[in-house]
Image (tube, rainbow, N blue to C red):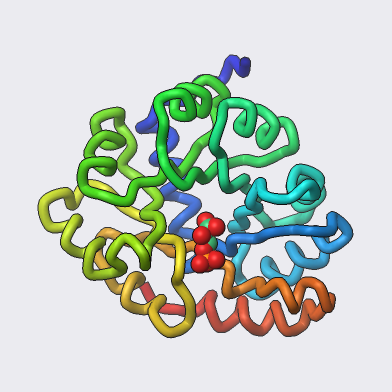
Amino acid sequence: MSSDRLTPAEASARTLELCRIAPVIPVITVHDAAHARPLAEALIDGGLPVLEVTLRTPAALEAISIMAEVAGGYVGAGTLLTPDDVMRAKAAGATFGVSPGSTDRLLDAVAAEGLPTLPGAATATEAMRLLDRGYTTQKFFPAEAAGGASALKAIGAPIPQITFCPTGGIGPGNVRDYLTLANVACVGGSWVCPNDLIAAGDWAAIVNIARTASVLVR
Ligand code: 3PG
């Protein structure tokens, strides 16, 4: 266990800072660790320096450790489900975490490991439970399936003290609906790093997509 325990309030302050750096956090799935460095460089070059690498592939932890060495980036681990995920992500060099939902075991682990984490909520009750623990910055997931921007706007009326990073089903056609909400700091999405462009090594195309996303107005 790390000695750098982090309170939920401290974690939320740090994740809010990260969410304010750019309008979009790329949600990255890496199948080949050789792609990690050029992909991180392309996204950072395009103006999206806060990167979430999902722990869904065997290459993910190696990709995190490679991306953590790329100057100008902030590399986090997504799909944190268990305390073991938290420890492995931190050991690989992740400086923040993202989880699709929230369990007490997971929240205890991120606090004990001192890994600032965006915990996931999809309903008012889940968001309130996290707020009870002190989490004022949360991920809204799965954003589109859970009601989209109108649901998030509605949650913000009675609970304006939570700021969200909605993720799941967001792309060029609906991203502005989220970014204009008062309770949204940024969004997460995989559309800025499509699998086919990664597989083709078309880093220039990814720089272009990232540039377009990086100037979206919040
Ligand atoms: C995630 O993996 O956290 C999100 O589901 C990414 O969603 P997207 O692929 O719809 O952007």
Q: Is 70 situated left or right of 82 in this image? A: right
Residue 92 higher or lower than 164, as above or below: above
Which residue occupies 44% across, 61% down? 167
- In percent of width and height, residue 26 lies at 59, 64
Q: Is 186 situated left or right of 82 in this image? A: left
Which of the 4 image quarters holds residue 185?
A: bottom left
Q: Nearer the viewer, residue 54 or 22?
A: 54
Which residue occupies 78% across, 77% down? 203
Q: Is 214 situated left or right of 162 in this image? A: right
- For the N terminus, the quadrant is top right
Which of the 4 image quarters holds residue 197?
A: bottom right
Residue 7 higher or lower than 59, as above or below: above
Q: Is 203 situated left or right of 171 in this image? A: right
Which residue occupies 26% across, 48% down? 162
Q: Residue lying farthest right?
A: 34
Which of the 4 image quarters holds residue 47?
A: bottom right
Q: Nearer the viewer, residue 11 or 107?
A: 107
- In percent of width and height, residue 10 lies at 41, 32
Q: Residue lying farthest front?
A: 145
Residue 31 higher or lower than 210, as above or below: above
- In percent of width and height, residue 146 lies at 32, 60
